[in-house]
Amino acid sequence: MSESLRSEGGEERSLICLSGAQSPGAANRFNNSVERVSFSRDELRSLLNLYGRNVSTGAWCDYAMDFLYDRALFSIYRANSSHALYTIEKRPSLRNKQGQYLVVNRQGRVLKRGHGLERVLRVLDPGFALVK
């Protein structure tokens, strides 16, 4: 938004209003034609349901989401940890190959890879165990 103002000397000056805390250079950086990869609403629901169940048991404490040009990341943290315990990645470039979803542990080892998010998340949510 831009407004014209007159100074005391009669000069016309422009006032440019920027919303948010971003600088004009930062705002222009996101206005390109390349879309960032993100999670859909259903994918976020699945991720947050799994996260909520594990927070209630005390296993997990925090999460972070990163949306990059080639992948989206959902990182899960344990209490007082600076490194992610698990990272769930969505890489659309691998959609026709091994599958666009993968779960990576703290050491960088791929625990599960596949085409469906629900199926990949089962590695983190083993469910019920048989008790004798």
Image (tube, helix red, strand yellow):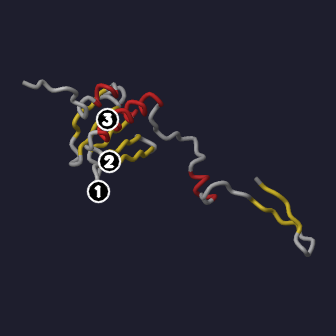
Question: 28 above or below 115?
Answer: below
Question: 41 above or below 56?
Answer: above
Q: Counting other residues with Cα less than 10 Å from the Cα at mark 1, is it few (<14), some (14-19), or many (20 or more)?
A: few
Q: Decide which of tag 3 and tag 2 comes sooner along the chain.
A: 3
Label 2 is placed on what type of residue?
Cys
Residue at point 49% right, 41% down? Answer: 36
* Front-lying residue, 124 or 70: 124
Q: Decide which of tag 3 and tag 1 comes sooner along the chain.
A: 3
Find the residue positioned furthest to the bottom. 9
Image quadrant for the C terminus? top left
- Residue 73 in the image: x percent, y percent? 38, 42
The picture quadrant where one finds residue 81 is bottom left
Find the residue positioned furthest to the right. 10
- Residue 38 in the image: x percent, y percent? 46, 37
Q: Could you tell me which secondary element the residue under label 1 belongs to? A: loop
Instruction: From the image, tell me which residue sits under label 1.
Output: 80
* Front-lying residue, 75 or 70: 75
Instruction: From the image, tell me which residue sits under label 2.
Output: 61
- Residue 78 in the image: x percent, y percent? 28, 49
Instruction: From the image, tell me which residue sits under label 3.
Output: 53
Q: Could you tell me which secondary element the residue under label 3 belongs to? A: helix
Asked whether the beta carbons under mark 1 and mark 2 sit within 8 Å of each other, the answer is yes
- Residue 40 in the image: x percent, y percent? 46, 31
Label 1 is placed on what type of residue?
Asn
